Every structure is written in structure tokens, then in C-alpha cells.
Image: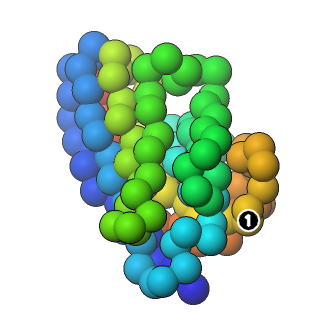
Amino acid sequence: QVQLVESGGGLVQAGGSLRLSCAASGRTFGRYNMAWFRQAPGKEREFVAGTTWRGGSTDYADSVKGRFTISRDNAKNTVDLQMNSLKPEDTAVYFCAAGARTAPVSYSENQYAYWGQGTQVTVAS
């Protein structure tokens, strides 16, 4: 079992930056791939970024490549999402997820068994 708690969301102007953090409970954090998903109003939840269980591989949705960076610290049981050059279309609820050890990282939410409650990110134009 893994419990996930996100933090760091908020309101930011377009072009600004935010850093999301996800803290995980349990001793098995390092056994899971970790990912960030997001869901905008009226849209389906979509993959944003993911990292394999040791952090050796990362992957990003095309819409955020070059702007977002995912990183994990297995000693601290945390995974962060650094978001730069934010755009209004990045506005969404962002979810942290833990899931199966696949390589490369899976984009499918079906591969992630554990989810946080989400944190709101709003980018004003």
C-alpha cells in the first residue's frame, strides 16, 4: 500500500513557474514507477510525466516537453514536478500516481494503482 499526498499547486501568471511535490508513505516507494497526470474541466485525465522506479528513465507528454521536469528522491519518498513557462492550457487538477514497474514509463492510468487527491494548478493569462 502506498498513500500519496500532493502539494504545491496554486495560481500563477502565464510564463511563471510552480513546483509540485508528492509525498509517499510506506517503505516500498522505490518499487513503483511514479507519474503525474492532470485533468482539466470537461476533459479526461491525461499523462503529464513519469519516472521509472529508480529514476533512471523519464518521459513526458509532448505538450510539456522542455517545460516540465519530473524528479524523484527514493530516500525521501518524494516525487516532484517542476513546471516552467506555464500556459493557461496547463490549468488542471494535477494528480500523483504510483504504479507498475514498466520500462519505458506507461502513459496509461490503468497501470497506476495508487493516486493522490490532486492539487489545483491555475494559470492566468
Q: Secondary structure at mark 1?
A: loop
Q: Quadrant of the N terminus?
A: bottom right
Q: Residues within 10 Å of mark 1 (few under 14, many from 20)?
A: some
Q: Position of residue 115 (x, y in %)?
A: 54, 67
Q: Quadrant of the C terminus?
A: top left
Q: Quadrant of residue 84?
A: top left
The residue at 55%/79% (across/down) is: 28
Q: Position of residue 63 (x, y in %)?
A: 58, 20
Q: Is residue 42 visible?
A: no
Above or below residue 3? Residue 66 is above
Q: Position of residue 104 (x, y in %)?
A: 77, 44
Residue holding disc 1: 100
Above or below residue 101? Residue 49 is above
9 to the left or right of 83: left
Asked whether 4 or 101 is in front, the reply is: 101
Q: Position of residue 87 (x, y in %)?
A: 38, 18
Asked whether 104 or 62 is in front, the reply is: 104
Above or below residue 72? Residue 124 is above
106 to the left or right of 56: right
Tally of numbered discs? 1
The residue at 38%/48% (across/down) is: 80
Residue type, numbered disc 1: Ala
The residue at 61%/39% (across/down) is: 58
State the scheme by which the image is colored: rainbow
The residue at 47%/40% (across/down) is: 70
98 to the left or right of 92: right
Q: Is residue 103 visible?
A: yes
